Amino acid sequence: MSREVTSPDLVADPQLLPRRTRSGRWRGLRRNVGWPLLASIVLATGVHVLALANITVLFAGPALSFWFLLLLPVYLLFTTPTWGDASTAERLGFSLTSVLLALMLAGLLANTLLPHLGVPRPLAPVPVLVMGDLLNVCLFLLREWRQQAEDSRPDIAWRA
């Protein structure tokens, strides 16, 4: 366990650094990501199969696409310790608007650059899947990186 520093003078003492993270895991790469990651991979695979095989399922196809392009990135950004002390509603609003902005900019960039690179339909299912994959992977890596940075901070109590 780590002990608290009660002095305003912060001394870099190795004993002050916790050996375990705040969530109880050991430092290093988080290996216990659990069933949400597995469910996300299965659902993303389903989205890819439906889009690449051009299979139309009445409600499942649009629902999975909505989840893949909007709900999953919002969840990944919402659970990232980026927003500081913002309330839940503020975190949700910031995450939703950030993802919508990222999707609009990615679509604009794809629609502008991909025709010059020889892609005839830049907003067809395959380029949109690649953009969604890149967005989700980047947000997942950001979330892991920010979580490790958050967990590696020592617990320090300041008293006046």
Image (tube, rainbow, N blue to C red):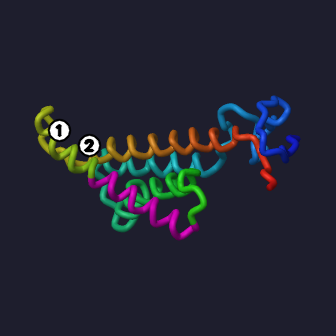
Q: Which residues are magenta?
A: 87-104
Where is residue 154 shown, x and y percent of the image?
75, 41
For label 2, count other residues whose C-alpha is less than 10 Å away and answer few (under 14), some (14-19) or many (20+).
Answer: some
- Of the two numbered discs 2 and 1 on the same chain, state the one appearing first in sequence: 1
Instruction: Give the amino acid at mark 1.
Output: Leu
- Disc 2 vs disc 1: which is toward the camera? 1
Q: Residue at x 58, y 56 (%)?
A: 84
Where is residue 86 shown, x and y percent of the image?
56, 63
In the visual, does 120 lie left or right of 105?
left
Q: Residue at x 51, y 52 (%)?
A: 76
Secondary structure beneath dot 2 equals helix
Q: Are marks 2 and 1 in contact (CB under 8 Å)?
A: yes
Main SS, magenta region, reads: helix
CA gap between label 2 and label 1 equals 9 Å
Q: State the residue in front, 45 or 6.
A: 6
In the visual, does 160 lie left or right of 57?
right
What numbered label is drawn on residue 114? 1
Quadrant in the picture for residue 79: bottom right
Instruction: Give the amino acid at mark 2.
Output: Pro
